[in-house]
Amino acid sequence: NNSVNSVDRISLASGATFTSSAGSITMDATTGGISGEGAVTLYATNGITLNDQFTSAGATAIDADTDDDGGTFTLASALTSGNNTLSITAGAFSLNSTLSSGTEGTTLLASQSGTTIGLGTSSCGGSCGISLTSTELSNITAGSLTIGNGNNGSISVEGVSASDSDQFGALTLNATTSGSSVNFETSDSTFQGLTVNAGNGVSITSNLTTNG
């Protein structure tokens, strides 16, 4: 009930799956937080909000937009999957707290086909479908970070500093649909390591540094 008392917590069994087939999921547990004994899966059509600390001990998969019409994943408190993979699919992301997969990989995917993705200070020329700001990127800790797959549109990157990216390992950017590109815009960016896969080429108009 999100009240401050000794029993306000949510515990999930290993392998638990929560599904909202025609609505959203909001999890609140002010005192004890939300914990999973192993792998956890969350599915919703109209968004998923985690208001309090969420900790799982296994691979964690979250889809906040299963009907692909724009559900938002909102993180208001820390999310960690230990040293286990973490995958989040959504129509939009609001990462107001930290998320961590430890030494394992984190994957962030756009639910809607053709969605453009902007990283750092990029506005995608005013057309970003999904924006992950420099502050939001700095909230991610992972052995590696993958953004995008064969579903989204172009990815634009601008002004991602070392302090925004040094807490996750190698970054992979995927914009592999026909006509989609990856564009490094006018402000310099720095990453620990970088792999780029694009269906219609890569554009670099700034200094790009990798430290890995």
Image (tube, rainbow, N blue to C red):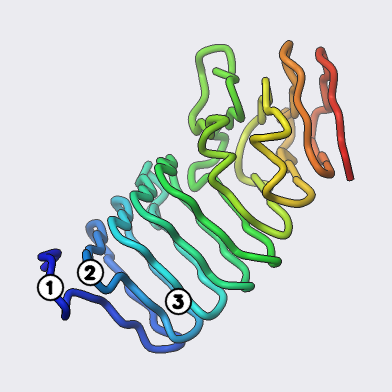
Secondary element type, mark 2: loop
* Percent coordinates x, y for residue 105 in the rendering: 68, 62
Q: Which residue is located at x 72 percent, y 60 percent? A: 143
Mark 1 or mark 3: name the one nearer the start of the chain: 1
**In the rendered image, which residue does mark 3 sit on?**
40
The quadrant in which the N terminus is found is: bottom left
* Percent coordinates x, y for residue 183 in the rendering: 74, 23
Mark 2 or mark 3: name the one nearer the start of the chain: 2
Q: Are marks 2 and 1 in contact (CB under 8 Å)?
A: yes
Q: Mark 2: few, some, or many residues within 10 Å (few <14, many ≥20)?
A: some
- Residue 7, located in which quarter of the rendered image? bottom left
* Percent coordinates x, y for residue 141 in the rendering: 62, 54
Task: Find residue 57 and name its label.
Answer: none
**In the rendered image, which residue does mark 1 sit on?**
5
Three-letter code, disc 2: Thr
Q: Which residue is located at x 75 percent, y 46 percent? A: 171
Specify whether 155 is left or right of 59: right
Q: Nearer the viewer, mark 2 or mark 3?
A: 2
> As displayed, is residue 175 above or below residue 204?
below
Q: Nearer the viewer, mark 1 or mark 3?
A: 1
Three-letter code, disc 1: Asn
Task: Find residue 31 and name its label.
Answer: 2
> As displayed, is residue 72 above or below residue 181?
below
Q: Are marks 1 and 3 in contact (CB under 8 Å)?
A: no
- Residue 23, located in which quarter of the rendered image? bottom left
Q: Which residue is located at x 69 percent, y 50 percent? A: 168
Secondary element type, mark 3: strand
- Residue 51, located in which quarter of the rendered image? bottom left
Secondary element type, mark 1: loop
* Percent coordinates x, y for residue 18 in the rendering: 33, 74
